[in-house]
């Protein structure tokens, strides 16, 4: 009997150990009431293979009806209760109605926003099935595609509360991470038919990279997606703590980087390096920054860095000249300059002129930095208006810095503002949901309409004129058998006239 229980324990133990990280991967392509999506099934299969290589226990489900999705989530819940990390990866159509997100099964028939809870799966219900995971609950949504359900409902005016894309989740609970393929209210393309969506392709590339915390891994996904889809802005909601959460622990460790020129510009690295040099404000820091990014000398931040470096060198030279004794020699002046900044090198023989930023170019760069922080919803046009001013005001409140532009601001003022914006890259503005006002009535109800004219009284028909009797004449009344044909009753008998 002891041997039997020992063998049983040995059979169960590996299963419990292997189930530390589990994933449910869903891909819905074959929709029945709207055109088929070409890539979600391919996305789901590729992600499932990649997660298995990282040690996940994976359940793959494709082209699921609503009943099948509910059953899959219910079964997955029992396994999630025993897992450290539980993930749901969904590729397909999604929809936001009244601030709530829904995943759309392939058999959904949605004609009215009131069909939401009857035809779709609310994301809060998905989160509830993951709530038992011990360390982290994670949902990845590659569902921010152009949605024909939304277009049809808006066209038929049955979706006043239907949004474009998905909404931010603010009540997901602790130890939860939700990754969106696009920012709230935005969409991304599905990609070429038969392949993977741009978001899934970036996610797969990040999984194959060196092991790293999931937040850094999704940051790499964001960087690649921005390069492949101009204007893309994937979003991550996280309530994770300070512990590291690694999804790709089975990937090879990073190797020593090979020296060589930078081939592709990493915008995030550029911003961080610029901010580091700006805070240091030393010649050495600017020299390192300019040497690293000299291949991108036409970039706005490179131009600003070069200008700051030259301005700092000019200040050092001016200070040395001001402190130079009148009887001093040129050698003494050179020694004082070296004492003020030992890192200042000898001036270059001839330096090319730095192109001057125009006011429009500077404001355009400000708008780009505001848009990167979700503080500018408008079009990038380089024109200073209410949206730019509003974005700066909102970012000022959230960062505690004074960020403003006036009509009288000089180019130097704008450059200093660009430098400050580059330093506060970790501050984001909240997404403002547009509240649609009801159509205005033709006339306000509070206005008093002029009194309608009273209808004219009907004009009475004139009374028939009666001939007044002449003085001296006698007025006779008609007798009972008056004969009107003869004007008297003399020739009538019983009302019938007779001859006289």
Image: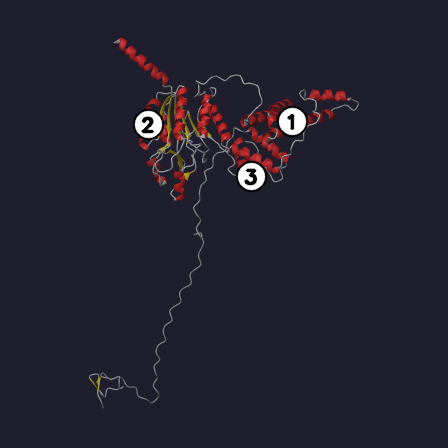
Foreground of the two, 267 or 312: 267
Mark-to-mark CA distance, 2 and 1: 60 Å
Mark-to-mark CA distance, 3 and 1: 29 Å
Q: Residue furthest bottom?
A: 500
Mark closest to the chain's N terminus, 2 or 1: 2
Task: State left or right for residue 476 relative to residue 135.
Answer: left
Residue 72, labelled with which disc? 2
Mark closest to the chain's N terminus, 3 or 1: 1
Q: Position of residue 251 (x, y in %)?
A: 45, 18
Is residue 159 shown to the viewer in this render?
Answer: no
Dot 2 lies on which element?
helix
- Res 352 quadrant in image: top right
Residue 309, labelled with which disc? 1
User: The N terminus lies in which quarter of the figure?
Assistant: top left
User: The C terminus lies in which quarter of the figure?
Assistant: bottom left
At horizontal 54% and vertical 41% (from top left) the residue drawn is 386
Q: Position of residue 48 (x, y in %)?
A: 39, 24
- Res 106 quadrant in image: top left
At horizontal 31% and vertical 14% (from top left) the residue drawn is 11
Q: Badge 3 is on which residue?
A: 381
- Res 2 quadrant in image: top left
Of marks 3 and 1, the one in the foreground: 3
- CB atoms of marks 3 and 2 within 8 Å: no
At horizontal 42% and vertical 61% (from top left) the residue drawn is 452
Q: Residues within 10 Å of mark 1 (few under 14, many from 20)?
A: many
Q: Position of residue 412 (x, y in %)?
A: 63, 34
Mark-to-mark CA distance, 3 and 2: 48 Å
Task: State left or right for residue 497 relative to residue 406.
Answer: left
């Amino acid at each position: 009997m002891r041997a039997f229980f020992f063998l049983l324990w040995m059979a169960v133990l590996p299963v419990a150990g292997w189930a530390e990280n589990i994933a449910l991967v869903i891909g819905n392509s074959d929709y029945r009431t709207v055109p088929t999506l070409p890539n979600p099934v391919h996305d789901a299969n590729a992600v499932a293979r990649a997660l298995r290589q990282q040690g996940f226990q994976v359940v793959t489900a494709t082209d699921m009806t609503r009943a099948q999705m509910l059953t899959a989530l219910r079964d997955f819940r029992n396994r999630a209760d025993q897992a450290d990390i539980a993930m749901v990866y969904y590729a397909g159509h999604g929809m936001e109605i009244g601030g709530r997100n829904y995943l759309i099964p392939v058999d959904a028939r949605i004609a009215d926003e009131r069909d939401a809870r009857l035809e779709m799966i609310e994301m809060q219900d998905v989160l509830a099935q993951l709530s038992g995971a011990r360390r982290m609950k994670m949902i990845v949504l590659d569902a921010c595609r152009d949605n024909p359900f939304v277009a049809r409902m808006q066209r038929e005016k049955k979706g006043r509360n239907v949004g474009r894309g998905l909404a931010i989740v603010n009540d997901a609970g602790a130890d939860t991470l939700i990754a969106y393929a696009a920012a709230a209210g935005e969409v991304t393309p599905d990609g070429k038919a038969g392949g993977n969506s741009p978001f899934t392709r970036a996610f797969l590339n990040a999984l194959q990279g060196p092991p790293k915390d999931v937040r850094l891994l999704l940051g790499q996904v964001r960087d690649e997606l921005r390069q492949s889809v101009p204007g893309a802005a994937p979003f991550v909601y996280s309530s994770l703590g300070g512990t590291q959460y690694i999804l790709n622990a089975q990937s090879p460790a990073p190797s020593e980087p090979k020296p060589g020129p930078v081939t592709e510009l990493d915008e995030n690295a550029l911003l961080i390096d610029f901010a580091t040099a700006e805070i240091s404000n030393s010649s050495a820091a600017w020299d390192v920054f300019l040497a690293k990014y000299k291949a991108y000398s036409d970039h706005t931040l490179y131009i600003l860095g070069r200008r700051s470096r030259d301005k700092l060198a000019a200040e050092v030279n001016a200070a040395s000249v001001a402190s130079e004794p009148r009887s001093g020699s040129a050698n003494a002046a050179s020694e004082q300059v070296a004492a003020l900044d030992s890192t200042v090198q000898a001036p270059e023989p001839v330096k090319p002129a730095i192109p001057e930023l125009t006011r429009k170019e500077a404001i355009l760069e400000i708008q780009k930095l505001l848009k990167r922080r979700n503080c500018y919803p408008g079009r990038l046009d380089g024109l200073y208006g209410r949206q730019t001013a509003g974005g700066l005001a909102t970012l000022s409140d959230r960062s505690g810095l004074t960020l403003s532009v006036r009509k009288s601001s000089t180019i130097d003022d704008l450059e200093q503002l660009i430098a400050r914006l580059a330093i506060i890259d970790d501050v984001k503005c909240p997404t403002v949901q547009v509240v649609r006002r009801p159509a205005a009535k033709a006339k306000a109800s509070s206005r008093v309409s002029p009194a309608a004219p009273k209808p004219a009284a009907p004009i009475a028909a004139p009374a028939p004129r009666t001939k007044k009797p002449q003085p001296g004449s006698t007025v006779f009344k008609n007798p009972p058998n008056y004969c009107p044909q003869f004007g008297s009753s003399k020739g009538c008998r019983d009302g019938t006239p007779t001859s006289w």
